[in-house]
Image (cartoon, rainbow, N blue to C red):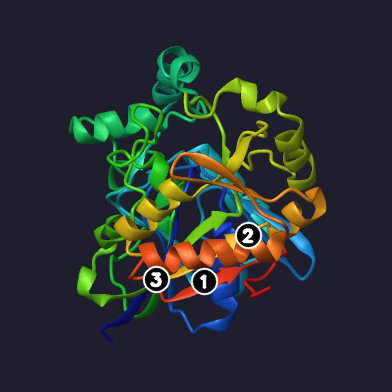
Amino acid sequence: MDIQNVDICCGLAWGDESKGKIVSHLSKINNYDFICRWAGGNNAGHTIIKNGIKYKTHLIPSGIFYGIKCIIGPDCVINIDSFKMEIEYLKRNGFDTNLIKISPKAHIVTLNHISDDTKNYNKELGTTNKGIAPCYRDKYGRTGQRVCDEKSGYLKQYIWDEKLYGNILCEGAQGYWLDINRGDYPYITSSTTLPYGACSLGFSPKLINKIYGACKIYDTRSGIDPNFPESLLEDPELSKIIIIGEEYGTTTGRKRKVNWLNMDKLIEAINITGTTHIILSKIDVLVKVKIFKYIYMGKIHTCKNIEDMMNRITVLFSYKCQQLKNIYFSNNKETINMV
């Protein structure tokens, strides 16, 4: 059976855009044969709520929660100990880990990578201390260790035959403004977060159908970035969003810095990624905070209420994002919905 269709979910901001929720929702309503992760390592995190129970993964695709084959692609990096812990966590919760496969070409994060990250990257660039940047450095320096070279043999049972077929959903990690090429260099991740990176899994870009772009109704950022100064944490209005929105990193537990939705950056992200369906999450948070602002043309604009804000955003999209077909505003943690 050949590949019939490929959909992609990517982040449009700095990660933490509720991609896990979106992939979970799409997994429930569509007949996907595979859910695939194309980049990154256990420096990312997805939170899934299924039947009222919250689950967290860092590397394994969200399709595992719906009995769908899960692929960790060749441009991912694998921390074996972290992967083992995730497997055991999923087993304890009753999920079928036999569905999980890893590309033999994915690279392995070693203890030396983690040590190097801690010493040379974390303080200046705000990395997650997971060894991701040094691992990618060695991959492109052609000195890295791949899954097919693993000596302990634990990963052998999970090696993928690199064959895809049917209906596929590709799950992104991080977001547009963390992309190695498009992001706020050097305060970025070490891999490609844009949808075209998913083609590394082994399919033509001509097979891509829908691109689901994820963002929040406000911006958040973990780690160090001059565009998100520490002073944002002192803003009383933004601090309310942190508390009500529970803005703490899935992987690190770090408090995220919050700012008003930057429409200038979002419009660029939509257009470069080719997003066809956008989901703006956490509408309910601004409703609770009762403050409705966004940034456009470098200026802060204040809206009367959430309806006014959504209308203004929709009008901007209609003028600036010609490829965009559908706009969804989500006000809950489990589903994509229009409000």
Q: Say if residue 96 shows up in the picture.
A: no
Q: Secondary structure at mark 1?
A: strand
- State the separation of the CA atoms marked 2 and 3: 18 Å
Q: Secondary structure at mark 3?
A: loop
Up the image or down, 158 lies above or below 59; here it is below
The reply to whether dot 1 and dot 2 touch (C-beta < 8 Å) is no
- Residue on which disc 2 sits: 309
Task: Identify the image quadrant of the N terminus.
Answer: bottom left
Reading the chain from its start, which is encountered first: label 2 or label 3?
2
- What type is the residue that disc 1 sits on? Ile
Quarter of the figure that contains the C terminus: bottom right
Q: Residue placed at 27% from the left, 50% from the top?
A: 105
Visible residue check, residue 164: yes
Residue 230: image location, x then y, percent: 61, 21
Q: Decide if residue 185 is on the left or right side of residue 205.
A: right
Q: Residue at x 73, y 39 (%)?
A: 242
Residue 187 placement, left or right of 302? left
Q: Earlier in the sequence, mark 1 or mark 2?
A: 2
Give the number of the disc on residue 327: 1
Q: Which mark is residue 324?
A: 3
The span from disc 3 to disc 1 (Cα, nearest Å) is 8 Å
Q: Is residue 246 above or below residue 277?
A: above
Where does the image place residue 190, in percent across and percent down from the top left? 34, 36
Q: Is residue 10 left or right of residue 65?
A: left
Instruction: Locate residue 224, reporting x and y percent.
Output: 51, 24
- Please name the amino acid that badge 3 sits on: Leu
From the viewer's perspective, is the residue at label 2 or at label 3 nearer?
A: 2
Please give the label number shown on residue 86. none
The three-letter code of the residue at mark 2 reads: Met
